[in-house]
Amino acid sequence: MAKRDYHKKPFGGEPFSKFIRGVIRLLVAVLIWPFYLPRAEGNRDEPSDGGCILVANHHNLFDPIFITFYFRSKRLCFIAKKELYNAKLIGRILKAFGAIPLDRSSSDLQASKFIISEIANKKIIGLFPQGTRVPIKKEISSDPHFGLIHYAIRRGIPIIPVGIDPTYRLFGRPRFVFADSILLRLKDGEKLNPSEQTMVSHEVMRRLYALVGRDYPRKDNVENEKLFLRKIDVIPLCE
C-alpha cells in the first residue's frame, strides 16, 4: 500500500476538516476546559499577515490543544511527530488542524522544505523546540531543536513566544502566557557557530519559562544569557 503524503494535502481547508475542528473545540470547551480551568494571558493578536513562528515550552499532551483553543488563527499549524499519523483517528484530527508531520528519527528534508514553504505561504508554524514533553522541574539535559528558530533569525521572521505553566490537575488552572511578537536578529557582524546556536536555543527556552515565572533548570543559564545579549537583538513588534 502506498504511503499517504500528508504534505500534499490541503491545509485543513476542506469542509470536513472545518467540521472536525468545530467538534474538537466544542469537546474541549465542554469536557476538558472545566476539568483544568486553564487561563490565557497576554497578546493573542497575529503579528502580521506574513508567515511567522509560534514557540512554546512543552509539558503535557494538552499544550497544543489549549494553544489552538485560545489562539484562534486559521493560519496556525503545529509540527507533529510523524508516528502520530499512524493512528487513523488522531491522524485525521491532526490533518484537520493542518499539523505538519515530521520524522524526528532522521533528517526529514521533505518536511523541512514543506515547513519553509508554509511560512512563505503566510502560515503560523507552531513549534515546541524541546521536541517532546518535559517535566517542568526536571533538569534539562537535552538540547532544544534550533533549526527553525535559526531560520527565523536569519530571515527576519516574526516569533510569537508562549510560556506554559503546566499545572495540569483538577482545577489546577494551567496558564498560557502569549507574549508580544518579536524579531530576533543577529547584531552587526555577528555569527553563530553550532555551539553558540545551542546556547541561544537554551536562552530562548529560559525566557519562555520565565514568562510564567518558572526557573529553567540548567546550570549554564548565565553563560547562555550573556552570549545571547552579546549576539542577538530582540526587536518588539507591538505597536
Image: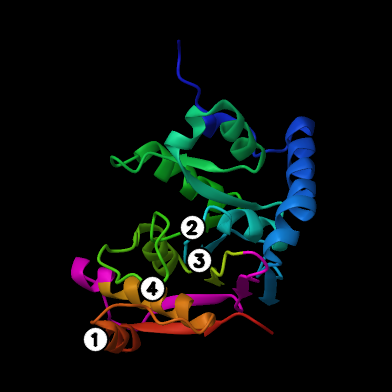
In this rendering, the label closer to the viewer, 1 or 4: 4
Few, some or many C-alpha atoms within 10 Å of disc 2 (few <14, some 14-19, many ≥20)?
many
Q: CA distance from mark 4 to mark 2?
A: 21 Å
Counting from the top left corner in percent of width and height, residue 143 is at 28, 64
- Could you tell which of marks 2 and 3 lies nearer the N-terminus? 3
Counting from the top left corner in percent of width and height, residue 220 is at 23, 82
Q: Is residue 136 magenta?
A: no
Q: Is residue 179 magenta?
A: yes
Q: Name the residue at 27% across, 74% down.
A: 199
Counting from the top left corner in percent of width and height, residue 112 is at 40, 45
**For the residues bearing labels 2 and 3, Cβ distance under 8 angstroms:** yes
Q: Is disc 1 placed on a helix, strand or loop?
A: helix
Q: Is residue 26 above or below residue 8?
A: below
The amino acid at mark 4 is: Lys
- Could you tell which of marks 3 and 4 lies nearer the N-terminus? 3
Q: Is disc 4 placed on a helix, strand or loop?
A: loop
Counting from the top left corner in percent of width and height, residue 191 is at 26, 74
Q: CA distance from mark 1 to mark 3?
A: 22 Å
**For the residues bearing labels 1 and 4, Cβ distance under 8 angstroms:** no
Q: Quadrant of residue 110?
A: top left
Few, some or many C-alpha atoms within 10 Å of disc 3 (few <14, some 14-19, many ≥20)?
many
Q: Nearer the viewer, residue 28 or 6?
A: 28
The amino acid at mark 1 is: Glu
Q: Dot 4 corresponds to which residue?
A: 137
The amino acid at mark 2 is: Leu
Q: CA distance from mark 3 to mark 4?
A: 16 Å
- Could you tell which of marks 1 and 3 lies nearer the N-terminus? 3
Left or right of residue 15: residue 196 = left
Q: Dot 3 corresponds to which residue?
A: 56
Q: Dot 2 corresponds to which residue?
A: 127
State which region is magenta: 170-198
**For the residues bearing labels 1 and 3, Cβ distance under 8 angstroms:** no
